[in-house]
């Protein structure tokens, strides 16, 4: 049974290459979130031709949604002949900016030595194309299957997913009553199953001061020095405390198995002038200094504790440092998500990887987050993994590529998983 299916997938090679190239050629750059309608139209045409019913959903009112940059999402559904479970493949259609350093046309889809090059090749238009050929091959091989298959192309994952999966989850598209298994074909490598991701908490901290002449700083109060005290406390107390917390999550790379925090930016004093400004700065004591922090946290850390740890540290500085005033503003947060190793989608894809590649997969978790959080938290659907072709480290880099034989192997794993889930 599977041999014929695998043979069918091998025969899609040329189609898979063209499909991937076509998707790369649509420059769905986010921000600002361009050409979502164009890519939905392309997916609609392709999947309608394969017998899917399609629905367009615009995330009206989501961040970034506007008449010039509407957040369009496409959901395609194929019904089997008998009732049964629904397996959903979710891919984001947006890509990040091109950046410098390319030797190939970022939207050209050039093919060299089993690789297709382009922005989004691995993250994640190659994964989207792979799930499409896998589903089509499965349907052609098993027209009598039970259940349903859904494929969605969704907006804005690269900017948090609020105009994509989060919106669809709020509308009930990931209700466990209608969808039972979710695979997100992010580029986690064809022999790894990604169970989830760490959480993130983003905040801006501002220290306050008082402006005065720079020659008499004692007449003012320097907000940058107050921020220096904050940074010193981070170095002496917070970073060592975070480094001592190690998660049970199989995060890769392993450096991310502890709590981490990046200081994203520091701004204090006068605004920076344009690069062509040739004047000298005025002499002022800064009355404000702001930093943005990017705190990534573990399953084992409640988000309330993550927030409170920083607030306690700031309050402790306030108790011992004269004139120390601060404000803290939360910018965004995402909760960690971790699917149980015993979940049906995990054991199914595990067996399929063994069938196709002849070896056991490894389980990993992602240091950053992806759309699984919305499916888990808003959709209340825990039976979700990321599994797809591509090398994670190539994501967002110049000369990003996807391996053609890796896509074919992953398509076999996906189609074999459909056999395990949707055949009697
Ligand atoms: Zn991605």
Image (tube, rainbow, N blue to C red):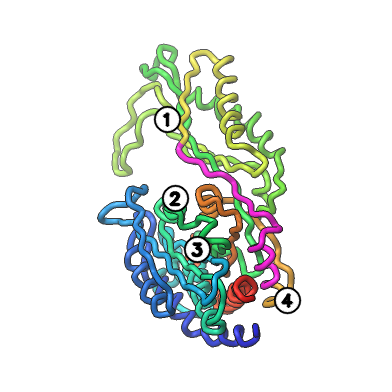
For the residues labelled 4 and 1, the Cα–Cα distance comes to 57 Å
Residue 9 in the image: above or below residue 162: below
- Residue placed farthest to the left in the image? 67
Q: Eyeballing the image, is 245 above or below 348?
A: above
Instruction: Judge left or right: residue 367 versus residue 273.
Output: right
- Between the C-alphas of marks 1 and 3, the distance is 42 Å
Q: Which residue is label 1 attached to?
A: 268
Magenta span covers which residues?
331-353
Say which element carries label 1: strand
In the image, residue 54 lies at what x, y percent?
39, 69
For the residues labelled 4 and 2, the Cα–Cα distance comes to 39 Å
How many numbered circles does the render carry?
Answer: 4
Residue 230: within the magenta?
no
Q: Which residue is mark 4?
A: 358
Residue to which mark 2 is pinned: 170
Verify CB contact (< 8 Å) between mark 1 and mark 3. no
Q: Secondary structure at mark 2?
A: helix
Q: Secondary structure at mark 4?
A: loop
């Amino acid at each position: 049974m599977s041999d014929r299916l695998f043979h069918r997938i091998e025969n899609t090679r040329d189609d898979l290459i063209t499909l991937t190239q076509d998707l790369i050629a649509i420059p769905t750059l986010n921000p600002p979130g361009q050409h979502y309608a164009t890519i939905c139209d392309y997916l609609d045409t392709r999947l309608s031709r394969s017998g899917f019913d399609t629905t367009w959903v615009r995330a009206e009112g989501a961040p970034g949604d506007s008449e010039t940059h509407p957040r369009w999402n496409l959901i395609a559904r194929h019904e089997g002949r008998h009732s049964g479970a629904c397996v959903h493949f979710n891919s984001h259609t947006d890509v990040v900016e091109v950046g410098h350093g390319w030797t190939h046309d970022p939207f050209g889809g050039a093919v060299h030595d089993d690789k297709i090059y382009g922005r989004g090749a691995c993250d994640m238009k190659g994964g989207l194309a792979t799930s499409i050929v896998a589903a089509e091959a499965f349907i052609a091989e098993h027209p009598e299957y039970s259940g349903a298959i859904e494929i969605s192309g969704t907006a804005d994952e690269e900017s948090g997913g609020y105009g994509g999966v989060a919106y669809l989850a709020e509308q009930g598209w990931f209700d466990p009553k209608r969808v039972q298994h979710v695979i997100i074909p992010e580029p986690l490598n064809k022999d790894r199953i990604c169970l989830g991701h760490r959480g993130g908490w983003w905040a801006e901290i501002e220290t306050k001061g008082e402006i005065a002449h720079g020659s008499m700083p004692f007449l003012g109060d320097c907000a940058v020095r107050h921020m220096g005290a904050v940074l010193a406390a981070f170095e002496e107390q917070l970073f060592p405390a975070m480094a001592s917390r190690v998660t049970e999550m199989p995060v890769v790379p392993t450096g991310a198995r502890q709590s981490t925090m990046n200081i994203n930016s520091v701004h204090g004093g006068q605004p920076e002038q344009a690069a062509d400004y040739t004047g000298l700065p005025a002499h002022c004591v800064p009355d404000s200094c702001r930093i943005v922090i990017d705190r990534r946290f573990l399953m084992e850390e409640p988000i309330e504790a993550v927030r409170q740890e920083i607030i306690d540290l700031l309050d402790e500085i306030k108790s011992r440092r004269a004139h120390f005033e601060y404000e803290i503003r939360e910018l965004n947060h995402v909760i960690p998500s971790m699917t149980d190793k015993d979940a049906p989608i995990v054991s199914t894809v595990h067996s399929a990887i063994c069938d196709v590649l002849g070896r056991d997969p490894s389980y990993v978790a992602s240091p950053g987050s992806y759309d699984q959080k919305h499916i888990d938290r808003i959709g209340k659907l825990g039976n979700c993994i990321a599994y797809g072709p591509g090398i994670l480290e190539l994501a967002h880099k110049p000369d990003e590529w996807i391996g053609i034989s890796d896509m074919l192997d992953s398509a076999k794993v996906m189609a074999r998983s459909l056999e395990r889930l949707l055949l009697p």
